[in-house]
Amino acid sequence: MTTYACPMDPDVIKDAPGNCPKCGMKLVPLISSEHEGHEDHASMEQEFRKRFFITLPFVVLTMLLSPNIQKWLYISLVFNGRELLLFIIGTFIFFFGGIPFFRAAKGELSHKNPGMMTLVALAITVGYTFSVAATFLFPGESLYWEISTLISVFLLGHWLEMRAVRGTTGALAELAKLIPPSAHLLKNGTTVDIKTSEVGKGDKVLVKPGEKIPVDGVVVEGESSVNESMVTGESRPITKIKGDKVIGGTMNQDGSLTIEVTKTGADTAISQIMKLISEAQASKPNVQHLADRAAGILFYVAVIAGFSSFFFWFFITPVGAVFAATVAVAAIVVACPHALGLAIPTVTTITSTLGAKNGILIKDMKGLEIARKIDYVVFDKTGTLTRGEFGVDKIVKAKNSSFSEDELLMLAASVEMKSQHSIARGIVNEAKRRKSTIPEVSSFKSFPGRGAQGKVGEKSVIIGNKKLLGELKIETEDLEETSQGKTPVYIVVNNVFQAVVYLADIIREESKNAISRLHEMGIKTAMLTGDTQDVAEAVGKELQVDTIFAQVLPEDKVNKVKQLQQQRHIVAMVGDGVNDAPSLTQAHVGIAIGAGTDVAVESADIVLMKNNPLDVVKAISLSRKTNSKMVQNLIWATGYNVFAIPIAAGILYPSFGILLKPEWAALFMSASSIIVVINALLLRKAKL
Ligand code: ADP
Ligand code: MG
């Protein structure tokens, strides 16, 4: 059974998934149980181990009792009832060692999905039945020692494999461990230690140097640097002073911080990330379906190979029943499509963990799967390629304006206080810088991608771009002074145009690098913005993007993506805003940057934790690496059968005398699974 624990309070442990009764947060599985619907790996691992060691001495005994082995060892243990003793020991091994396989086979059959375990069960049953018949019904050599060693190797193989698979899961448990179990709550000037799950919104907690920050919050006192790499992938420590946000689970370094809690339980960044990762691990890439189909086919190939080789050797050649049965068992064993079942899931679990460690959250494996084929990346401009931190460059007043610059800025800021746009923030900040008091606005209305309006006292104020003024039929005058490459925003008071505010944004340092890296990879780039052609071209030239789409209304952004798709491009869209959400969904791969707005995160396939366009390059490289691992694993897992099945069926026996004994077949089968897992594990070391 998988157990589930609350990431905030490790004392809460449940047998079933659900929400924590204390804090309401989603419980996380302590050990993930993704693959093949197996029970959870840790207890299965224990089970295989236990049965392996208990049966091992008996397996050795059956070997010693076998005439063949005795011949090889030049010993002789012949006594009356030897066959009967072999039967008793063999039966014990068959049932005791075989139980996990029978149980799993039953599960597979009840799901009408016969696979690996059904084949193992079939192989050992065929071998055992044959041996019993040879003991009691007809004079012949039994296969007890072969079947016993086969079971032993299977137990060993599964034990080792589960151990390896366990290494590929556990990303969630790792994240859950980031949250410290207790926090120092500040109360009446002293601190009380309480459980992290009992911390409430608005509480103040103290974080001492070298301690982990327990919950999301804002610094109210103190100064320190914080290592946020576990959440954002950013390795440099970030300086935190009063007013800065901190994330639960990150590591406080040199100073003490007093934090006011803003989010608890399911709302915290860590829980959001855990939610995304568990979604990702549940999502299957398309190759998974291919692998599942191949595994299904292989089941029948194995059964047919087994039975036809039995009949071939039994009837057509005079080698005899023992030989025929041995060959049949070997053929069934070797064809077990276990490696195929592991080929994809082991890679995807590692990929999502590796991604998370690099600040790349994969929400949908299908998105990551296509990402390697991307040949066009469309970037939103504001907030993605640029920082989205506008500063006021200058204000140019209309000739007849009777207001002062500061008055106009104050009126504009009063409307913009209600807007979420980065331009709005720029204007508000400038007004504050000029020490204006910003009055309250009423009847606020926002025009997405154009601007906003509202009433400030008796005055109606409109602030927005030329498009908005055109729509509202407000005349502007041509100003003598302009500001090349800066974003113009128009201020209108009582339906009369008053001034243009020119704002400038800063291009992110990494943007240029990201674009040129994409070009090196043979990928074209486009920039998409609602800003003016002039500004778009200035930024576009600086960054050398191939295509510029400017003055695009939010509702039209999605059409630009469609347009590229119609030209048969595989398109990725990178954006952060609410107005990017439809294009993120439309694109083949939607990438939300900087953990963006919730809507953008919802619509994306991949979420980048940092505000770094270079991570787009990393995500594509992760996709390419993941894909080649998957292909390698698939080729190995299927290709191995092409050689192994005919050899096990005895094709080399007539001419070369080469035959695969069942226990060797089992060894190969287990080895091929372990190789697949190890190959996947190598991805952990990959540099993006
Ligand atoms: P982007 O595509 O660059 O993220 P938007 O589509 O959100 O930009 O906005 C496009 C343009 O609309 C902006 O460049 C600006 O001129 C105008 N605009 C949008 N919202 C506002 C606002 N709150 N105040 C002023 N202008 C705005
Ligand atoms: Mg934007």
Image (spheres, grey):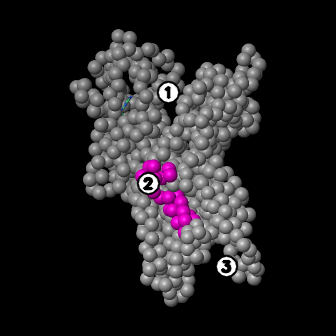
Q: Position of residue 248 (x, y in %)?
A: 63, 34
* CA–CA distance in space, label 2 to label 3: 38 Å
Amino acid carrying label 3: it is Asn
Amino acid carrying label 1: it is Asn
Taking the magenta stretch, the answer to whether it contains residue 105 is no
Name the mark nearer the viewer: 1 or 3. 3
Q: Which residue is mark 2?
A: 113
Taking the magenta stretch, the answer to whether it contains residue 116 is yes
Name the mark nearer the viewer: 1 or 2. 2
Does residue 23 lie above or below 111 as drawn?
A: above
- In the picture, residue 182 is in which quadrant? top right
- Disc marking residue 68: 3
The region drawn magenta spans: 106-130
Query: What main secondary structure does the magenta stretch of the protein show?
Result: helix
- In the picture, residue 90 is in which quadrant? bottom right
Q: Quadrant of the C terminus?
A: bottom right
- Disc marking residue 429: 1
Left or right, 18 with reference to 480: right
CB of mark 1 within 8 Å of CB of mark 2? no
Residue 489 versus residue 260: which sits nearer the camera?
260
